[in-house]
Amino acid sequence: MRCEGASSTGSEPRGRTLMRGLAAGSFVAWGILLGASLAQQSGEAPRLTGPTPFTKETPAPPMQRQITDDVRRRRSYPDQPPLIPHAIEGYALDLNANKCLSCHSRKFTEQSQAPMISVTHFQDRDGNTLGGVSPRRYSCLSCHVTQTGAPPLVPNTFTDMDALVGREPRGQ
């Protein structure tokens, strides 16, 4: 039986087209495997884990000291989540409690003098304003991190946005 609109000239049976597709796919897969094998044997594959093979367990490096001077840091790019300028060790952050909100929620900012969380934390994914913190913004440590004096693990060539475009003049 023929499909409507199909021409009899220049078409191949479905089986042959399927076999060609499978052959091409297996050829690509073998090429990838061969390339990965050669890179591993030559030792030229880039490593981010150091000289020890990733299959061997190594002791974790010591934790770096947190910078806890309570000084708010300038952000490096627009919409960067602010860094946490204080110690958070022992803070409860689970479904029943969020210690961050005891200072940063709108209700407590006057007495704590902590900056209030952004209004975006009270919006759902559709931009609707909610009566409380949005569930997708409840886990503060998903975006906000403490600052440490740790050296970078890899070379960093990041250039601050203001350095790229020149300092904007202050409002008059």
Image (cartoon, grey):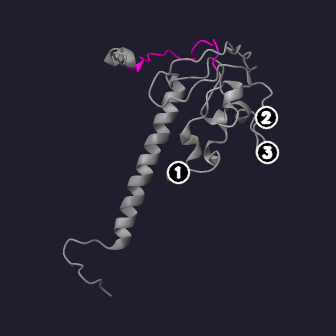
- Please tell me how crowded label 3 is: few (under 14), some (14-19), or many (20+) other residues with Cα within 10 Å: few
Amino acid type, residue under disc 3 in the picture? Asn
- In x, y percent, where is residue 48? 57, 23
Which label sits on residue 166?
A: none
Q: Do tag 2 and tag 3 residues touch (Cβ < 8 Å)?
A: yes
Q: Which residue is mark 2?
A: 92
Tell me which segment is drawn in magenta: 147-161
- Residue at the location (38% across, 59% down)? 21
Residue pointed to by mark 1? 125
In reply to whether residue 98 is colored magenta, the answer given is no
Q: Tell me the chief SS of the magenta region.
A: loop
Q: Residue at x 61, y 14 (%)?
A: 71
Which residue in the rendered view is the most extreme toward the bottom? Answer: 1
Q: As displayed, is residue 109 above or below residue 18?
A: above
Residue positioned 61% across, 46% down in the render = 136
Which element carries disc 2, helix, strand or loop?
loop
Residue 73 in view here:
yes
Label located before the other in sequence (1 or 3): 3
Quarter of image, res 85: top right
**Residue that mark 3 sits on:** 96
Farthest left residue in view: 9
The quarter of the picture where the C terminus appears is: top left
Could you tell me residue 128's position as x and y percent? 52, 53
Q: Is residue 55 visible?
A: no
Secondary structure of the residue carrying numbered label 1: loop
Pick the residue in front: 146 or 130: 130
The span from disc 1 to disc 3 (Cα, nearest Å) is 22 Å
Q: Is residue 93 above or below residue 164?
A: below
Amino acid, disc 1: Arg
Give me the residue at 65% from left, 22% from top: 146
